[in-house]
Image (tube, rainbow, N blue to C red):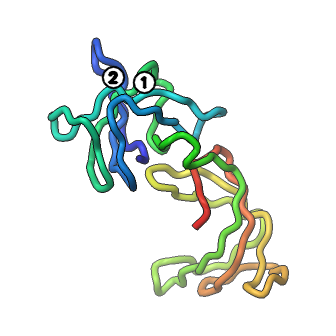
Amino acid sequence: MPVEDVFSIKGRGTVGTGRVERGKVRVGEDVEVVGLAKETRKTVVTGVEMFNKTLDDGQAGDNIGLLLRGVEKKDLERGQVVAAPGSITPHTKFHSEVYVLTKEEGGRHTPFFAGYRPQFYFRTTDVTGSVHALMTREGKNAEMCMPGDNIAMEVEIISPIAMEDG
């Protein structure tokens, strides 16, 4: 579940809200808070709420709040992911194949080169990254990327983000 917002409930603890992407989460289950921090944090779900009703579990598609044991409000933020242990890992580097929108499609009207530093959007967060290498679909180095190009790129972002192949 990507964290959309964080609340502190007096006498109960910290609640992270968001929409469950897949699977189920149950009260008493071990979970990990992944991304935007130096280390993945392990915790336990002590409560599940949806529209002010306490539930035993939440499933894919539900907008819920998760009460997390021992997690301070300052340790949970928008953009992190609450997941089953070992199901997702944080990364700062990735390889991507992209289509760059043209000006008419609402995208760029100028080319960009290796070293370009755009914002990358992942679930509920955005993070600055640097494009290190541009390659054609055939695997040859490309000097620049024009609007309308299909291109592969190596990217390094400044904060670890929960990512998986796909």
For disc 2, the marked residue is 8
Q: Are marks 2 and 1 in contact (CB under 8 Å)?
A: yes
Task: Give percent across and percent down for residue 48.
Answer: 28, 34
Instruction: From this view, report whether residue 103 is shown above or below residue 94.
Output: below
| Residue sitting at x 52%, y 58% | 121
Q: Residue furthest right?
A: 141
In space, the residues marked 2 and 1 are separated at their CA atoms by: 6 Å
Instruction: From this view, report whether residue 125 is shown above or below residue 138.
Output: above
**Which of the pair 123/114 is nearer the observer?**
123
Image quarter for residue 49?
A: top left
For disc 1, the marked residue is 73
Q: Report the side of 145 relative to 55 (left or right).
A: right
**Which of the pair 12/141 is nearer the observer?**
12
**Which of the pair 102/13 is nearer the observer?**
13
Task: Give percent across and percent down for residue 65.
Answer: 29, 37
| Residue sitting at x 46%, y 23% | 71
Task: Give percent across and percent down for residue 104.
Answer: 47, 87
Label 1: state its secondary structure. Answer: helix
Instruction: From this view, report whether residue 108 is shown above or below residue 8.
Output: below
